[in-house]
């Protein structure tokens, strides 16, 4: 069976949940392969690099007869649920980092012979080599963004074998790099779909307000296929507006629609508009909100009005069930808790979460900060590392550019001040602005302490010059001193920009009660909140915060036995779903803010 030894190009399938698709979610057979026996021969040559491979689990072979030597068999191998990480599903894989081979089988029932077929993955952590019927489709790097491959030429009607080698080994040149404060969940962690399209189809589209207006819609669509100069029709049935335009030779179509009756989206009023985009046989539907977001001096303006961002930071984990969150139900749990806190904003840390989060935030009215995992100290001078980060950024922007809720693209968290780093981050800011000039761009920076005065905190990171928000993490009372120190702080902030506290907090074991000076007690954590919020209110330009963190989450950096036991316990909600005292402290503060119209 001949193998073309190339990685075919990935394709971006936008609005995938509105497409004609068959779910490939479910029970997949898997083979754990710590030595990559299914990928390399004993000379460490990759099997899929050769035209006539002598082995490789992607061939999904079966022994032909009793004499035939085949040392793996997916059919008799155990199963894992997809979507889902392997760590929380299988005790033996809880700490496992390495390769796991997944295999599923499916039939194809195309509705027209000239239609095209794609396999779509919501995400796979961290590297995924994808094969269909023994054919290499491609390799995706990055654990939190979607990817798809065309299989039209390789698919057969019956019994297709889809094999994916997922490897979550951490590597120094990766994004993220080898050390993070979250669990390195591996696997096919989000939806897998078989997508069918007409020969020419709409691969992605973008809807937004024309800059400087609140009632002119700028629509664009990208066609993929032979007849890329086709007509594209955009229709907003309830707004009773529509437009027709022709795509150019590159398959790109643009149109402007005057929408005199357009109502703007906001957390209080999350108005979404049904939209239909069609071209030839292809038709996509979506629900899109329109709003403006901007900064003016030290204010954040939503639809031209000053807003205070009542936020919370969230990891993509369902603490109660355990493991990576991936579904609409998980999104409802996490954003439901944020709503109970009276939040109008969430920071999805530190990597792009699944699409259900931003879509639900659109529906229920919560603003969103999205981030790529340029976390702590990655390889700033490594061109491949930069290309990897740029790809993750462009993929999340392509995926969520139509979400009204998403208002901030964050390009990094807690990265060390330095020339190479600032140059690296600046290029990400430029990329974000060139791909989407309608949203704010920021990062979570760090604070430095005046060497002559421990109570004097300084924010003058040179990277702050390039961001729309002056956002930083601040841990006085936990990593720096005791809670009483919070009351005595004074700040020097270099930038005349909205000040946004992207993290503050303290650990507390849910149910552990003691005096407010006993670390890990709920009282200590509540005291940090009680002192920090009024302290922040005194900072000129204080425009919001996303305390660390909504709920406890697993971290390999937190071994304190009997207290942390492998969890970062800075959550306001324990990993049993129970609220801690500090939850009420923050909620009361946000209720006050909301009452004042913020
Ligand atoms: C850091 C970091 C988080 C981490 C938190 C903590 O600021 O950004 O990822 O979990 O602090 O130490 O709890």
Image (cartoon, helix red, strand yellow):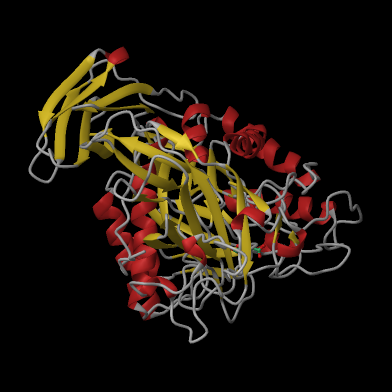
Which residue occupies the foreground of this view, 457 or 73?
73
Residue 586 position (above or below residue 539): above
Which residue occupies the foreground of this view, 477 or 206?
206
Q: Quadrant of ligand 1?
A: bottom right
Residue 482 pos. (x, y %): 76, 66
Quadrant in the picture for residue 434: bottom left
Would residue 469 be found to the left or right of residue 452 on screen?
left
Which residue occupies the foreground of this view, 548 or 28?
28
Residue 59 position (above or below residue 27): below
Quadrant in the picture for residue 132: bottom left
Residue 175 pos. (x, y %): 47, 68
Q: Quadrant of the N terminus?
A: bottom left
Q: Residue at x 60, y 37 (%)?
A: 335
Q: Residue at x 47, y 44 (%)?
A: 159
Residue 151 pos. (x, y %): 34, 48
- Count of labels shown? 0
What is the residue that sits farthest to the right in this orientation? 514
Would residue 27 be found to the left or right of residue 418 on screen?
right
Residue 179, visible in the rendered structure: yes
Residue 34 pos. (x, y %): 62, 73
Residue 185, visible in the rendered structure: no
Q: Residue at x 54, y 68 (%)?
A: 447
Residue 82 position (above or below residue 40): above
Q: Residue at x 51, y 33 (%)?
A: 360
Would residue 381 be found to the left or right of residue 594 on screen?
left
What is the residue that sits farthest to the bottom in this orientation? 43
């Amino acid at each position: 069976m001949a193998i073309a030894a190339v990685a075919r190009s990935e394709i971006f399938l936008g609005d995938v949940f509105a497409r004609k698709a068959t779910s490939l979610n479910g029970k997949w057979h898997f083979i754990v392969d710590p030595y990559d026996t299914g990928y390399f021969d004993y000379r460490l040559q990759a099997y899929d690099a050769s035209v006539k491979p002598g082995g490789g689990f992607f061939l999904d072979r079966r022994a032909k007869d009793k004499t035939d030597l085949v040392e793996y068999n997916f059919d008799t191998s155990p199963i894992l649920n997809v979507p889902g990480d392997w760590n929380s599903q299988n005790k033996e894989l809880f700490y496992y980092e390495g390769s796991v081979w997944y295999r599923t089988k499916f039939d194809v029932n195309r509705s027209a012979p000239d239609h095209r077929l794609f396999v779509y993955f919501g995400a796979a952590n961290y590297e995924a080599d994808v094969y269909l019927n023994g054919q290499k489709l491609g390799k995706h790097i990055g654990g939190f963004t979607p990817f798809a491959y065309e299989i039209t030429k390789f698919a057969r009607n019956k019994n297709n074998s889809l094999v994916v080698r997922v490897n979550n080994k951490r590597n120094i040149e990766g994004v993220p790099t080898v050390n993070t404060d979250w669990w390195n969940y591996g696997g096919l962690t989000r939806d897998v779909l078989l997508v069918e399209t007409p020969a020419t189809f709409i691969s992605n589209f973008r809807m937004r307000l024309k800059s400087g207006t609140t009632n002119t819609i700028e629509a664009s669509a990208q066609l993929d296929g032979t007849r890329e100069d086709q007509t594209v029709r955009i229709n907003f049935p309830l707004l009773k507006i529509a437009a027709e335009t022709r795509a150019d030779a590159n398959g790109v179509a643009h149109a402007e629609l005057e929408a005199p009756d357009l109502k703007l989206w906001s957390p209080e009023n999350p108005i979404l508009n049904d939209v239909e985009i069609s071209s030839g046989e292809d038709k996509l539907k979506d629900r899109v909100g329109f709003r403006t977001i901007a900064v003016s001096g030290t204010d954040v303006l939503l639809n031209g009005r000053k807003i205070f961002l009542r936020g919370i930071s969230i990891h993509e984990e369902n603490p109660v069930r355990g493991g990576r969150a991936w579904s609409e139900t998980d999104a409802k749990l996490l954003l439901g808790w944020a709503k109970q806190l009276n939040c109008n904003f969430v920071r999805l840390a530190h990597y792009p979460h699944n699409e259900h989060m931003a879509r639900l935030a659109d529906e229920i009215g919560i603003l969103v900060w999205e981030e790529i995992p340029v976390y702590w100290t990655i390889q700033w001078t490594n061109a491949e590392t930069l290309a990897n980060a740029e790809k993750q950024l462009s993929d999340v922007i392509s995926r969520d550019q139509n979400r009204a809720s998403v208002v901030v693209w964050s390009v990094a968290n807690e990265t060390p001040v330095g020339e190479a780093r600032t140059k690296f981050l600046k290029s990400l800011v430029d990329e974000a602005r060139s791909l989407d000039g309608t949203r704010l761009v920021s990062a979570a920076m760090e604070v430095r302490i005046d060497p002559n005065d421990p109570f004097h905190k300084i924010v003058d990171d040179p990277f702050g010059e390039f961001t729309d928000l002056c956002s930083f993490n601040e841990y006085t009372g936990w990593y720096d001193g005791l809670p009483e120190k919070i009351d005595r702080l004074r700040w020097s902030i270099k930038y005349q920009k909205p000040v946004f506290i992207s993290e503050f907090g303290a650990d507390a074991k849910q149910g552990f009660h003691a005096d407010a000076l006993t670390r890990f007690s709920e009282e200590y954590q509540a005291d940090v909140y009680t002192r920090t919020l009024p302290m922040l209110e005194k900072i000129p330009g204080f425009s919001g915060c996303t305390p660390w963190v909504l709920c406890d989450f697993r971290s390999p950096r937190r071994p304190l036995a009997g207290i942390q036991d492998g969890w970062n316990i800075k959550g306001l909600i324990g990993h049993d779903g129970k609220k801690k005292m500090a939850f009420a402290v923050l909620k009361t503060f946000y209720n006050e803010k909301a009452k004042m119209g913020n």
